[in-house]
Each structure stands twice: as C-alpha cells, then as structure tokens.
Image (cartoon, coloured by chain):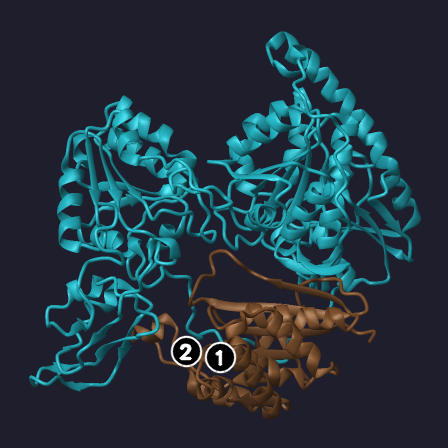
Amino acid sequence: MEKTTSVLMAGVGGQGIILASDILSEVMLDAGFDVKKSEIHGMAQRGGSVSSHIRFGKEVYSPTIPRGDADFLICFEKLELMRWLDYCNADTRVIVNDLELNPPMVNLGEAEYPRALFDETIKKFKNLTLVPASKTALDLGNIRAANVVMIGIFSNFFDVDESLWLDKILGKLPKKLHDLNRKAFSEGRKLA
Amino acid sequence: MKKLLSGNEAIARGAYEAGATFASAYPGTPSTEIMETVAKEYPEIYAEWSPNEKVAMEVAMGAAFTGARALVAMKHVGVNVAADPLMTLSYTGICGGLVVVTADDPQLYSSQNEQDNRNYAKFAKIPMLEPSDSQEAKDFVIRAFEISEQFDTPVMLRSVTRVSHARTVVELKDRQPAPMEVKVRKDPPKYVMLPVYGRKRHVVVEERLKKLKEFAETFELNKMEINDPEIGIITSGISYQYAKEVFPNASYLKLGMIWPMPEKMIKDFRSKVKKLYVIEELDPFIEENLKVMGVQVDLGKDVLPICGELTPNIIREKVAGTEETPFLANPENIPPRPPNMCPGCPHRGMFYTIKKLKLYATGDIGCYTLGALPPLTSLDTCVCMGASIGHAMGMSKALGDEGRGKFVAVIGDSTFMHSGMTGLADVAYNKSYATVIIADNRITAMTGAQDHPATGYTIRGEATHAVDFEELGKALGFKHIVKANPYDLKTYEKVLKEEVERDEPSLIINQGPCALLRRALPKAKKPFYVDVDKCIGCKRCIGLGCPAITWNAEEGTNADGKKRKGYAVIEPTLCNGCALCYQLCNMDAIQTEDKVFYGLVENFGN
C-alpha cells in the first residue's frame, strides 16, 4: 500500500477510545506497516471530547491527519461526529455508534442535543453505518465492552487475519474480561 | 525488536539504552510519561519526582558531576523554574553526560503559555537536539549523552506534544554501560562559580560553542535530502513531518541539532535550491538566525503563523497555496465538552463556598484552575506555579484594610510543595493578613496522579516521610491554621469566613483526597438518587456543575402539586456519593441508601 490510510476515532473520555486506537495501531504494525498515532492527553479529563489519529502505510509523515484526508471516521458517540466533519471527504467511510451522551450544557438544560442536525448530517455521507455497539455490549452484560464491539466492526474493513485482532485485544485486558471481550469482538464482526 | 512507543516512552528508552543511572523530573504535560516510564520499566535507573524542576535539575547535576549519565525532564514552563541552575550549569559543564528534556506545548493543550524553548539553547549557549518522531527521540537521547560528554556541556532535547504523545515505530536495542567511572571528583575552579572562576569558565563556554558550530557542519543528524531543486525547505522536529506530508518531493535540510546551527551547510544547501522556505512552528528561530548569516529566505513567518500548532493544512494553504474547501464544515453550535472537575472532586465544595461568600480567589496551576469555568466561576488569577500566594500577599498590601475579608489564595498540595513555601514565608514574615487554602487532595492530580513530598510515597510506591503542612505552616510563622473538610459545606463556610476576616495570616488545609485516588478510597460509597416526587426543579444542585447531575426538562408538578420546569437526575454510574448536592437540597429530594457523611472517606485526615 503506497498511500497512507488515515483513521480518526472520536468519542467521549472513558469510552475506551485510546485502547481501541492502540489495538488498531499495533495490529497494523504487525501487519507490516509504518504506523503513527497521535492524541491529546492532560487537561482533557473524564467526560471531555477525546480523539485519536491513526495513520499507517509504507511511510507515514505527519502523526496527525490533515483535515479532509480521513479515510475512516469512527465515532463512539453520535454528537462527536459533528466535531470532525472537516476531516472527512466525500469518500470517507463513517462508522457511528448509536449512542447519545449529553454534554454538560445539555445536562444543565442550556442547550439541546442536536438530534435533527445529526440526522441531516448522516445523509450527506455515501458510506455511513450506524451501529448498535453500546447496545450490543449491554446485551452481553457490560457496556464497557462497547469499544471492543467497535473494534470488531471496523476490523471488517481491513485485510488482516481475525486472530491477530483478538490476540492484541486479549493481550491488553485482564484474564477475567477475556470471555466477555471475545464475544464482544465476534458480535462486532457480525454487525458490519 | 520493533515496537510502537510514544515519544516520551522513547526518550525513557533512550536513557536506558545509553546506560543512564539517574533520572529526575517534576510532572507536567506533555512531559510526564518520560519519568513514569523510567520508574515503571527500567529499575536500573534511579528515578524520582523532585519537588520542582529546579530541584530536578540540581539533583541531575549532582549525579552528572560524579560521572553518572543523568536525564532530567520537564515541560516547557518547567525550564523557567530550572533556568537558574541551567544558565550556570552551562559554565561548569558536566562530567557524566547530562540531558535536559524540554517538552513544549504549542497550541497550549494543557499549559499557561506556548513559549518556544529553542530560545533557551541559544540563551544558555548549549546544544539542542530536536527529534521528529519516537525513533529519533530514542536515538537523539543516546547521541545527546555522547555530545554532552564529548563537549563537556549539558545537552537539551526538545520535544513537543505531537512528538511526546504520538506513538510511532521504534527499533529497540540493548542497554550499554555508561563510559565513565562514578566517583567524587574534586575540581573547584570548574565547579565553584565564584566570580574569579566564573569569568574563566565563560571563556570556555564561548570556545565550546565555536567547536560545537564546527561539529554541527558534519553532524550526521543534520541531514540534507536533495530531491527537486525548485524548493528547498529548512526545518526541524515535528515541522519536518508536516512539511514532508505536503511537499514529499522537495529538497530538505533537516536540522537534528537546532543549536548551534551549521552555517556552511546551510549556505551550501541554499546554493543547491532555487527557492528557500523555512517551515517551523512558533517563533522564527531558524529564520532569524539565517538572516543573521545573510542567507536569503524566500518564505517563512511572513506567511506562517507564530501562534499555535503548525498543521499540514496550514502548510498546504499558506505555503503551497492550495485552496482548502472542506467537503463538510463543522457546525458551530455543537455543545462543547469542556474539561470539568470530576464527580466527588474535593475542590467543588471549596469553590462553591468561595462563590457563595463572593470572595476573589487568586489561583494556581492544577485541576482547581478549572474552578474558573462556569458554573462555579470562582477563580480569578492563574499565572505560574505558586503565584496564588504571592498574588494574595501583594493584594493585601496594596488594598490595606479595605481588602480584608475579600480574597483568598487557592493552591494545590503538589503546587505548594513545588513553589508555595517561599510565598507562605513571605506572608508571615512581612505581616500580611492573607488567607491561603492548601487544597490538599494528596496527589498531583491534573497530570494523572503522581506522588510528591507530602503524599508519603515515592515514584516507585515505597512508603516515605510525608511533609506535614500544619507543622510547616507553624514553622513559617502561621498562628492560625485550620484543617477543614471541603465536603462539609456549612462548617467549611464558617471556617473560610472566619479566616478571611482575620488581621493576621491564616492557613486552611483542605481534608479531601482526589476522587480518583484509589489508595485513599478503599470502599466506594453508594450513589445518591433524586426522589422525583419531591424535586421542585430549583436547580440548586445543578449549580454545582457536577457531571453526575443532569437536568430533565419535563414541565409539570411534583407529588405535592408544586409546579416545576423539570427535575434533576443523578447518574448512578458517575455519582460517588460525596454528598454536596444532598446538603444543598431544601426538599429532601436527594437521598441515599448508604450512611450519610460529608465526603468520600469518613473522618479523612482526623
């Protein structure tokens, strides 16, 4: 692959986005690519917006994705999609977890969750999938596994052996969570 | 073996492979993980959280003076604190290699300014290396140790957020022993900077700089890539990666060593290309030095911004002249998710009380700086570590008696250990009436829970002496010292009111561990919940700005027929039972199945 592939993940602190982006990067490293990944730590605490840029290919330069160049936008929450539209182009493949998490202003009753705007926005993409990752995780008994369901979903878009994904996922989790996450991954794989 | 490492992990790995045996730091974004990695991964290296960057620098100097290889790491503004030893360390030189890491924060993701620390290398007359990814971060640290010993100078290594916090591929190698014997080396003319010795050492510094300039001309990390001769780009660090993204086929001079600069090599490069662009983030550091050399620059800060982080898009637009029209623009009115104090944060009760008493609060650096944001909006200054106390002291003298009862200083425990003690001494010594709150949450919280001299633990988790703030306050001359529970709103308000009214200095020490500090919170409290039948929608609890309390805008009446515009809801997975909202509710609508006490740990600190 000559061209660098750019994957942008976005969501809310605590959703396991950093773990998901670590797994994607390590899988691509093992698959033989040059990989770079970038995110912001520090003041972005629990509850803040979180994003992670993952890029892989023959040789990657910038660790951040130029605006307009995202090949994939993977949103763990619906509203977060609308903060990253400028990173997309007409061909960007978008995967959105069907989950609403209220920002503080919505909690305080000072703003409304922009539901109508979301519905309008998703019509503009030709490659957009709305997926029930959180619901699937909840059905499996633990909403925290939603990030692994998401990994299962987006793993379908890359030509990498299934076992490599699973090895990386389980390698990062304590043994007692292995069963749950094995199921979360395989449910996710079925969803896309 | 190849591994994905963050720039910070790679810097730590570099110190390990270079045979370093000593490392010190004070936490600060984006540098924190350097020392965390050393402590976690490399037991061969002594590691410490120092009380501040000045001490971190001094202890690293002490280690290097024995011949050991030492690494000291800090964020960009930390170098300001360590600048005093650094400027004269340039004169003494080192013995064993000493690498000073500065992690700059363009775009101020988590800082109070975006100063460009390349200027420090020029100011201190010492070499500075600038890696552009994790592989280079590791390799450059090793090279920095070698240059340090070869030229008897500290070497700075400059990272930025996008190097420190990006993960890129690194080839790991084995650890090599450091070359020098570690022993006491007596040499007063070199290490005692009396004026008579200092004058001689300044001459040595200037000679060293000349030799380093010569060295730079053939240094393998200053790399020329001659491709298309139409455009030649001089750049360094992360800016190189951004430039390559946009101009993969241009010619490059990538300065691995940003100071001193290789004049002959630069002029040689200039002669090989038609147009010369300088692409750099923040200050026109390369550009100005090129102009001093008389090198013609065709494009630089005349089009590129000095403020903020550089991006490939800025280079596309400003340098390549590509018109950027996004496929879709981001809507403007998407509700933001600003950082907020956590549910159960001990600072929330303090700020609620400060707001209620309409006090002006001089502030400091830490999680509690977030007290400046709505809805609490009760922090009024924040400049640098420790400044809150000085601000309050200065205000007390400027305002005189008029100011009594009107303001208070707020400083965290780690920040107090860093730079608060001298300010506190001033308050007592110069007879101010200022009141200082040490918002003691028993950890350096903002950077992700690092220990400090008052927590009772070292960086590797060994138990150690914990500074006693009460005894310290007494020793510094404070007669009025109160320990107060910031979760107990009534009592806390009474204490704060009493202390700010005094005509003598007073110190309040908050008793409440960080809500994320696992070791202080052995047992979780049950969450509170809202009895929807009782809630009248008065929003008193909402005013706390707790992430666990949300508003359900459903007009109607409560069970007693009282009209309401909505009602409050407590999210059980977020609430940790601190009981602040419970105390504010006049309707008894906020309840719990747990035992009620104010705070997360019963009788904490008593």
Whether residue A124 is visible = no
Q: Is residue B294 left or right of residue B558?
A: right
Q: Is residue B342 left or right of residue B227?
A: left
**Residue at 67% across, 54% down:** B304
- Give A75 or B71, whichever is nearer the viewer: B71
- Are labels 1 and 2 on one chain? yes
- Give B556 or A101, whichever is nearer the viewer: A101
Q: Which residue is mark 1?
A: A77
Question: At label 2, which amino acid type do we have?
Answer: Leu
Question: How far apart are the two marked residues, 1 and 2, measured between alpha carbons?
Answer: 7 Å
Percent of width and height locating residue B242 = 72, 59
Chain A: drawing colour: brown
Quarter where residue B57 is shown: top right
**Residue at 26% across, 53% down:** B351
Percent of width and height locating residue A129 = 58, 90
- Give A58 or B263, whichever is nearer the viewer: A58
